[in-house]
Amino acid sequence: MPIKNTHLRDFEFLREMREDADYPPHLVDRGVALLVRLCEEIEEKKPADLKQLYSITLETMVLFHDLYDEFLEEGCEIEAIGQGIVGSDIFQIADAYGFDADYEELIAVSAFSLSSQTTETFDALVRLFFDEEDSGAVQIASATRNSPS
């Protein structure tokens, strides 16, 4: 489904990464697809508040974690600059949908700081981030982490 938001429909996601030859184009394209999917999920789920938005962006950050592993396999590390580009685009997305979001909350679980062996840590962070009323969000985030790419 195409993005309906007029500010984002033609937005060039991860432009700086696309312009930098250090980032493999096919992996950058997959990152762009994750951000487009984030827009589609926001349009479909219509989060009513920041807490709901943060649960959706958390899912996206988990998927970026998996993509980060693939960047490493290709000999490309996503350093602070790449992390900032992804975070900035997620912030732009939140702003375009009318959310006055906190940058740090949007990327609360930095996909780039997690290793493949941190499943238990991730689950603990998700439980800490969401209170008991958000058990559905915890299940969604955990399922997203466990789903095949």
Image: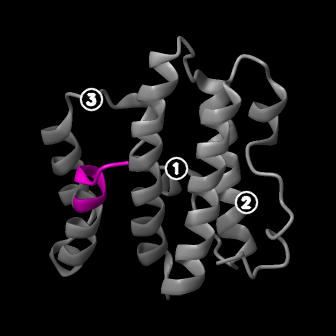
Quadrant of the rendered structure where residue 122 is? top left
Q: Amino acid at mark 1?
A: Glu
Q: Name which residue lies at 53% across and 11% down.
A: 75
Verify whether residue 144 appears in magenta: yes
Q: Which residue is mark 2?
A: 92
Region of the chain picked out in magenta, as a range: 143-149
Give left or right: position of 60 versus 6. left
Mark nearer the N terminus (2 vs 1): 2
As displayed, is residue 97 above or below residue 110? below
Judged by depth in the image, the label closer to the viewer, 3 or 2, is 3
Residue 16: numbered disc: none
* Mark 3 to mark 2 CA distance (whole Å): 28 Å
Question: Is 98 or 15 nearer to us in this picture?
Answer: 15
Q: Amino acid at mark 3?
A: Ser
Q: Position of residue 96 (x, y in %)?
A: 75, 72
Marks 3 & 1, CB-CB < 8 Å contact: no
Give left or right: position of 35 versus 6. left
Which quarter of the figure is the N terminus placed in?
Answer: bottom right
Q: Which residue is mark 1?
A: 104
Verify whether residue 29 appears in magenta: no
Tell me the SS state at disc 3.
Answer: loop
Mark nearer the N terminus (3 vs 2): 2
Question: Is 94 or 119 nearer to us in this picture?
Answer: 119
* Mark 3 to mark 1 CA distance (whole Å): 22 Å
Q: Name which residue lies at 47% across and 18% down.
A: 72
Q: Is residue 47 visible?
A: no
Please say which color scheme the image uses: one colour
Q: Which residue is mark 3?
A: 116
